Image (cartoon, helix red, strand yellow):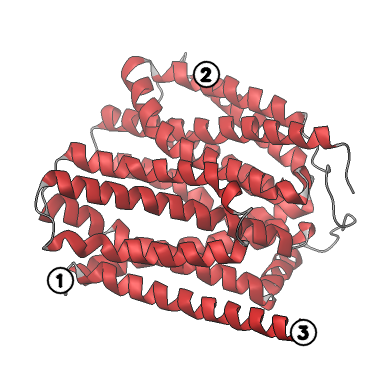
Amino acid sequence: MMKKNKFGKYNLSLFFMGKGVSVIGSSIYNFAVGLYVLKLTGSALNYGITLMLSILPLILISPFGGVIADRFNKKIIVVSMDIINGLLFIAIYLLTEKMNFSLGLVYLTTILLNSFGTLFAISIEAAKPNLVKEDRLIKINAYSKLIDSISSVLGPIVGGIIYALFDIRAFVLFNGISFLISALSESFMDFNYYTKESHVKINTSFRNDFKEGIHYFFKNKAIVEYFFIFATLNFLLGFSVNVPAPYLINEVFKLSSAQFGLINGLFPVGLIIGSLTIESLLKKFTYKKVLLSMNLFLAILAGMIGLPYQVLTSSVQLTIFYGLNFCLMGLAIAYVDVPITTLLQQEVPSHLLGRVMSILMSLVKVVLPIALVVSGAAISVMPIKLIPIIGALASAGFTLYLMNKEHQLNKLNFENIE
């Protein structure tokens, strides 16, 4: 069922504004408060704890956040989380008029902000198919990826500027007001604009709802396949890129910190370009073709991380090579992320989407730290230039298997039509 088309455009603009303010504000705060802790304590350990506390709620809450998103009104959750975050920051601002913004208060604020932010993110992601028509799912997913990409760029830049020029309390107040503005914009969104199915009431227990999500997840072959694509991609990045690339750039090739920063900065640039161009690409090719082709392309790019070992010599050549490689990886990741998210939204019933997506993301997040540990251990026992190649071959092999499977399926369907 659908209302007038103009409301779809209205939802899209409000989504961009609402999620943009929430995600970018949280990213800037997490970076700025990390620097504040470093200055306050002079301890790298406390700085690391702050970063860990910004990630921990995502890991712990995600598996259950999907059940909450599916059980309750998504609009109420989304708007409420932004209101609570806004009031939290304003309360912290008022509280620090009478006391210092202590380390304990920083830790508590970071945990609460990211806990509410996790529920917000899961709920608004699960609500996407009801916010726009099906043919605009790609656009809203591209917007969502664009917001995430911009936040990864603006977080460190704006966070660093705020930390250098303003008192941390002023930013706390500004962030609180921003969250309330975001909540206001989201309150105008129609979360039932487009529905393909009648509303399914959930009357079972929280535990049974969670088990239902897990059962549906592992029963559906397409979803399990998407999980393995995501998992393979995350393992590839962790094993072949995240550990070997910084080691090669800094320890082997001895590039400057400015050159290393430039190389890393080009990765989110690629993400942004990918987010802006994916919609046009998917008008020409099928989602599955783009998804698998880009997965294979990522494997090739990751395998090339160790290529300059005996080929390139000057620091300028190395900076250009790695900068271009990282930019293309960012582009390809956007080209994988948006189609796979859209396919999931089309595959999964809306009353299960929150649970399925939260389970998927939780399982995928376990893969990355494993890949990082294995890669770090591998560096000590084999030549570092081989590590990117090993990960790339494994990822490419799996992707080629899926490509062949897809080709055989298309061939069978074509023969049946004839």
Where residue 103 sits in the image (x, y, percent)? Answer: 37, 32
Residue found farthest to the front: 418
Which residue, given by chain and number where applicable, does mark 3 sit on? 418
Q: Is residue 43 left or right of residue 285?
A: left
Q: Please tell me the numbered disc located at residue 383.
A: 1
Q: State which tag comes first along the sequence, 2 or 1.
A: 2
Question: What is the count of numbered marks?
Answer: 3
**Residue 163 position in % (x across, y down):** 35, 22
Quarter of the image where one finds residue 205: bottom right
Quadrant showing the C terminus:
bottom right
Q: Nearer the viewer, mark 3 or mark 1?
A: 3
Q: Earlier along the polypeptide chain: callout 3 or callout 1?
A: 1
Residue that appears at 57% across and 66% down: 289
Q: On screen, 323 above or below 160?
A: below
Badge 1 amino acid: Pro
Choose between 393 and 63: the one closer to the eye.
393
Q: Earlier in the sequence, mark 3 or mark 2?
A: 2
* 304 horizontally vs 128: left or right: left
Nearest the camera: 84 or 302?
302
- Write the residue at 52% across / 18% down: 173
Report x, y in % for residue 262: 26, 39
Amino acid of disc 2: Phe
